[in-house]
Image: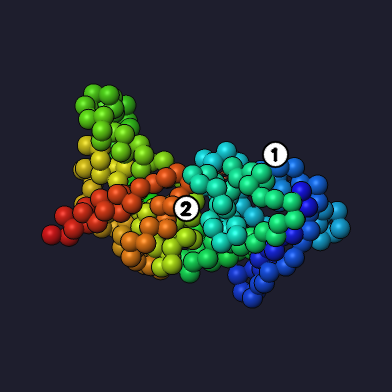
């Protein structure tokens, strides 16, 4: 395939930035999207030009770092996958592909397609943990019976990889799917009930302080989430918040 890429280039947080056109040729349909980006960058480096900065790590859909807005959709046109799992067979020879960073006030651009997502880390630090004695007296997790239905729901919520696609897809830049998943994975388990009240209050407070918007139930986040995190997690977080506030 021969493709035209329109890519957001921005030298740093203060730079205005803009779209720049590139051509890539002989792209195999079996390549991943990031391998196609590697081909582009190898060509730029060979010409002594600055390669396009983009985030990636595991390239297996696990780490959540590959955050690209492709043709107007976080993680591109496929469903239930991250950008690193997107294959070039989803595109056609001669296509023009628009590639941009996540757009949200709470995710400022660092360079080109790389955004600062440490806001998510600060939300996690505000409550996404349990206090367990690990000094040798830790209770075996299997000693606490948990209904399978609850365990399954908790595991589903824990599948969130913190990629930020929910924020990028939302017209309000809301992080409620992410925070809802993090609150839910603990709220559903007895080990998480001990600090449940402080957790939801502190995480929602931090979410608001970071500048994320509110949820207006459009559901774009659920559609674009690579881990199929359900909107039910937002409803559960709201219930937890209400209970903790009273
Ligand atoms: S809820 Fe989905 S889209 Fe949002 S951070 Fe988690 S995995 Fe990514
Ligand atoms: S590079 Fe880790 S999820 Fe894509």
* Residue on which disc 2 sits: 224
Look at 24% across and 56% down and name the residue there. Answer: 238
Position of 119 relative to 133 (above/below): below
Coloring applied to the structure: rainbow
Mark 1 within 8 Å of ligand 2, using the beta carbon: no
Residue 6, position as x, y percentages in the image: 70, 64
Residue 30: numbered disc: 1
What is the secondary structure assignment of the residue under circle 1?
loop
Look at 21% across and 27% down and name the residue there. Answer: 145
Q: Residue furthest right?
A: 47
Look at 75% across and 56% down and name the residue there. Answer: 94
What is the secondary structure assignment of the residue under circle 2?
helix
Residue 151, position as x, y percentages in the image: 29, 33
Q: For marks 2 and 1, give the CA distance.
A: 23 Å
Q: Quadrant of residue 147?
A: top left
Look at 81% across and 61% down and name the residue there. Answer: 49
Q: Residue furthest left?
A: 246
Residue 13: numbered disc: none
Mark 2 within 8 Å of ligand 1, using the beta carbon: yes
């Amino acid at each position: 395939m021969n493709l035209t890429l329109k890519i957001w280039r921005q030298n740093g947080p203060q730079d205005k930035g803009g779209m720049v056109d590139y051509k890539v040729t002989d792209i195999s349909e079996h390549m991943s999207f990031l391998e196609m980006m590697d081909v582009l960058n190898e060509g730029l480096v060979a010409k002594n030009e600055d390669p396009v900065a983009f985030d990636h790590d595991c390239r297996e859909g696990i780490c959540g770092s590959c955050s690209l807005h492709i043709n107007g959709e976080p993680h591109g046109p496929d469903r239930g996958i991250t950008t690193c799992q997107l294959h070039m067979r989803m595109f056609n020879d001669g296509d023009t592909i628009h590639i941009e960073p996540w757009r949200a006030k709470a995710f400022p651009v660092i360079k080109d397609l790389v955004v600062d997502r440490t806001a998510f880390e600060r939300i996690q630090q505000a409550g996404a943990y349990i206090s367990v004695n690990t000094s040798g007296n830790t209770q075996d997790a299997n000693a606490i019976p948990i209904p399978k239905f609850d365990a399954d729901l908790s595991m589903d919520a824990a599948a969130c990889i913190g990629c930020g696609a929910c924020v990028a897809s939302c017209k309000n830049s809301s992080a409620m799917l992410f925070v809802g998943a993090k609150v839910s994975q603990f709220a559903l388990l007895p080990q998480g009930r001990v600090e449940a009240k402080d957790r939801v209050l502190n995480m929602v407070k931090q979410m608001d302080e970071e500048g994320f918007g509110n949820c207006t139930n459009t559901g774009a986040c659920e559609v674009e989430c690579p881990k199929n995190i359900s909107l039910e997690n937002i409803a559960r977080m709201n219930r937890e918040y209400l209970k903790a506030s009273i």
